[in-house]
Amino acid sequence: SSELTQDPAVSVALGQTVRITCQGDSLRSYYASWYQQKPGQAPVLVIYGKNNRPSGIPDRFSGSSSGNTASLTITGAQAEDEADYYCNSRDSSGNHLFGGGTKLTVL
Amino acid sequence: QVQLQESGPGLVKPSETLSLTCTVSGGSISSYYWSWIRQPAGKGLEWIGRIYTSGSTNYNPSLKSRVTMSVDTSKNQFSLKLSSVTAADTAVYYCARVRYPTYSSIWFDPWGQGTLVTVSS
């Protein structure tokens, strides 16, 4: 199916590691990209391709993929990482797909 | 660095056509794909469609019958028209550059700041 599924909410203790996942059949063929969105702001790209970070994104953000699941890992979560995270990929028809988003709370 | 700015009416009446323009600064619009994405208040992101600077388009199948995108390379702008709008089209509309270096890898960067469009009489 042409859908990407994310857990609606995840929490992590300050300084701990958290994994945010994205599931979908298209991820078997295409890489996911990940976006961070804070309230009232536009989304910002944090991971793209196999595991690439744009300039300015801290190296505590990393990406991985296995089968139909892509993951965004934050190693040593900081208070400023509290945000909504969206995954994105494409399907075989060239259409873009977004996951429903995961709200990350840093405790 | 490349920056994007959305512009257009913030209020559109039901059944009318929503029209937005994205102006690209700091770089050329040529030889890239460009997209529109929207986000209703409190909800997730929805891809609307993309256009290449040649004019070739791909639209979200759920919106395809109402969407038209165009590009004006002389003005470094691309545009969105969404016809027959209803309250369900009320959202923040973002424009973004699409990076598409390989068949299997695609992403949006950068994004515009977004513009709120409300559909109401």
Image: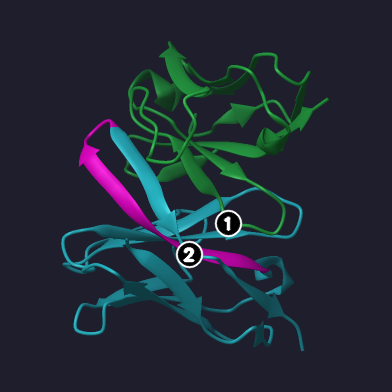
Residue A100 shows in the view: no
Q: Is residue A87 above or below residue B4?
A: above
Q: Colour of chain A?
A: green
Q: Residue at x 73, y 72 (%)?
A: B87
Q: Which residue is mark 2?
A: B112
Q: Is residue A17 left or right of residue B19?
A: right
Q: Is residue A91 magenta?
A: no
Please provide the residue range marked out in magenta. Answer: B91-104
Among the chains pictured, the one given cyan colouring is B
Measure the alpha-carbon separation of dots 2 and 1: 7 Å
Q: Tell me where residue B109 appears, x and y as whole percent.
A: 39, 51
**Is mark 2 in CB contact (under 8 Å) with mark 1?**
yes
Task: Give the main secondary structure, helix, strand or loop, of the magenta stretch.
Answer: strand
Instruction: Name the residue type under label 1.
Output: Ala
Q: Tell me where residue A89 appears, x and y as whole percent.
A: 42, 36
Q: Which residue is mark 1?
A: A42
Q: Chain of mark 2?
A: B
Element type where label 1 sits in the image: loop
Q: Is residue B29 left or right of residue B84?
A: left
Instruction: Name the residue type under label 2.
Output: Gly
Q: Residue at x 67, y 48 (%)?
A: A38
